[in-house]
Amino acid sequence: MNKKAKETVLNSKERRKNLLNCIIAIAIAIVFLFPIYWLVAMSFKSDAESFGKIVTYYPHNFTLDPWIENFTDAEFLKSLKNSMFIALLSMVLSMTFGVPAAYGMGRYRVPGSKGFLLTFLVTQMLPASLMLTPMYLIFNKLHLLGTYLGPALAISSGSVPFIVVTLRPYFKSVPTALDDAARIDGCGVFRSFFKIMIPAIKTGIITVVVISFLNGWNDLAYSMTFNVKPEMRPLTANIYKFQSKWGTKWNCIMAYGTILVLPVILLFVFLQKYIVGGLTAGAVKE
């Protein structure tokens, strides 16, 4: 068999292997994305179709009533505002405390830095239920119960360790020559930090911003515990309202759930390049 024939055989095997990998990837994607499709499809079904004996895999009687019922509900709009405000506030607090801490541990020789890093890693492993009682007592003394700041602080306490662990390798990988050049040009520490360091690790910053926002958006335990006023609770705490003694409005619950996961989907669709790159780069750079 000549060289050209061997190359043809190898290319044929490579094509078959790539085709098989594509089929497997598509099958896995269908399995994992089907619950999201079912969530969206159910949100456009009528009550009769939702409770029908025959299962339909797409809306036969397409309706927007579940969506209209949600968006015309004053309680829903208030919960939506609460979720957005808590998510943004927790994100701002997380970035305010986490990014400078990561910068300090990544750019300077801090005594006991390994111990601090280990503490951050252990903190990420603690379940939220373990932190509820001590935080509740502390927030009660500080008069933070029934405020947006209480759950935002609690959420950011879990996001800050993630930010430090993720961004520390980024800051360590930035050449020190950039700092020297910035100081020669007259930049102080703060100006160099905002003008040089932050743009240099843009991918990592986008990653932790998105994750910090989603931590606040998806929170249930802290908001239910520290927001003692029902009118201050987020979307995740009010989904039960469609359950009553007369039954459950599944199509409304599905529309409600779609609204909850929509920001998550949109953020990952439009920023997946930065998020995936940020997580992998932050995991291996030292």
Image (cartoon, rainbow, N blue to C red):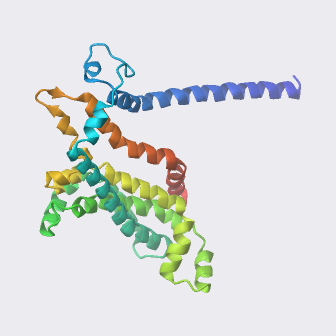
* Up/down of 98 relative to 220, above or below: below
186 or 167: nearer the viewer? 186
Residue 85, picture quadrant:
bottom left
On the image, the x and y values in percent for residue 62 come to 36, 24
Question: Which residue of the protein is positioned furthest toward the right in this rendering?
Answer: 2
Residue 97 seen in the figure: yes
On the image, the x and y values in percent for residue 105 come to 45, 71
Residue 95, picture quadrant:
bottom left
* Up/down of 140 relative to 4, above or below: below
Question: Which residue of the protein is positioned furthest toward the top in this rendering?
Answer: 54
9 or 180: nearer the viewer? 180
At 57% from the left and 67% from the top, the residue drawn is 200
Left or right for 83, reference 17:
left
At 54% from the left and 64% from the top, the residue drawn is 201
Residue 136, picture quadrant:
bottom left
Q: The C terminus appears in which quarter of the rendering?
A: bottom right
On the image, the x and y values in percent for residue 146 come to 16, 60
Q: How many labels does the image show?
A: 0
At 43% from the left and 61% from the top, the residue drawn is 165
At 55% from the left and 27% from the top, the residue drawn is 24
Residue 129 seen in the figure: no
161 or 212: nearer the viewer? 212
Left or right for 158, reference 238:
right
On the image, the x and y values in percent for residue 281 come to 54, 55
Q: The N terminus appears in which quarter of the rendering?
A: top right
